[in-house]
Amino acid sequence: MSLVVSDTTPLNYLILIGHVNIVPHLFGKLIVPPAVIREMSHEKAPAKVAAFVRELPDWLEVRAPSFDLHLDVGPGEDEAISLAVELRDAALLVDDRKARMAATEHGVVTFGTLALLDLADESGLLDFGQAVAALRATSFHVERALLDAIIAKIEARKRL
């Protein structure tokens, strides 16, 4: 992946579980649209997330899409998908199923928070089990079958 665009939710969870620092190690830079920053700055945003937005790291670039696809998803998701489509070779970090489907319909490769944590585990940046335990202490929801499949994949990788 040469470019990665993120929606709000995965970035929020990485901040909340203390692993947002994996992003520059995995991608160098992460691109987010202005709507994501607005959502992360909302008065109901967790304190850690609001603090992150007040001092954005150098590896995070805020970039507005030049067009809006006007998809039937949230504002952050809509701008993130529009931006990923515009950038052509960008992947999209997004958890919402409806947004993933919309992005895929527009030719965008998507991956979610769990896939990112798996990649970070594979790269030696964190322990997947510990990261998932931290995620479970938040409002993060995941289908048990999906989580079990990822855990089985990681266990098989670690046995090699």
Image (spheres, rainbow, N blue to C red):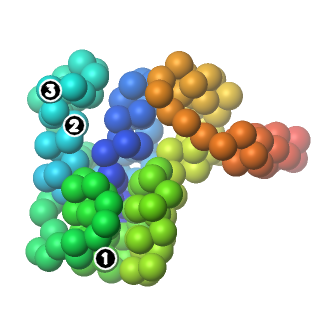
Question: Of the residues under marks 2 and 1, which one precedes in the sequence?
Answer: 2
Position of residue 83 relative to residue 138, above or below, is: below
Q: Give the quadrant of residue 86.
A: bottom left
The reply to whether residue 61 is visible in this rendering is: no
In the image, is 61 to the left or to the right of 106?
Answer: left
- Residue 36 drawn at (x, y percent): 22, 48
Count of residue discs: 3
Distance, label 2 to label 1, CA atoms, is 22 Å
- Disc 1 element: helix
- Residue 110 drawn at (x, y percent): 48, 64
Which label belongs to residue 43? 3
The mark lying in front, picked from 2 and 3, is: 3
Residue behind mark 1? 85
- Residue 3 drawn at (x, y percent): 35, 65
User: Dot 1, crowdedness within 10 Å: few (<14), some or many (≥20)?
Assistant: many
Q: Residue at x 28, y 22 (%)?
A: 46
The reply to whether callout 2 and callout 3 are in contact (CB within 8 Å) is no
Q: Which amino acid does label 3 sit on?
A: Glu
Residue behind mark 2? 40
Position of residue 151 relative to residue 97, above or below, is: above
Distance, label 2 to label 3, CA atoms, is 9 Å
In the foreground, 96 or 16: 96
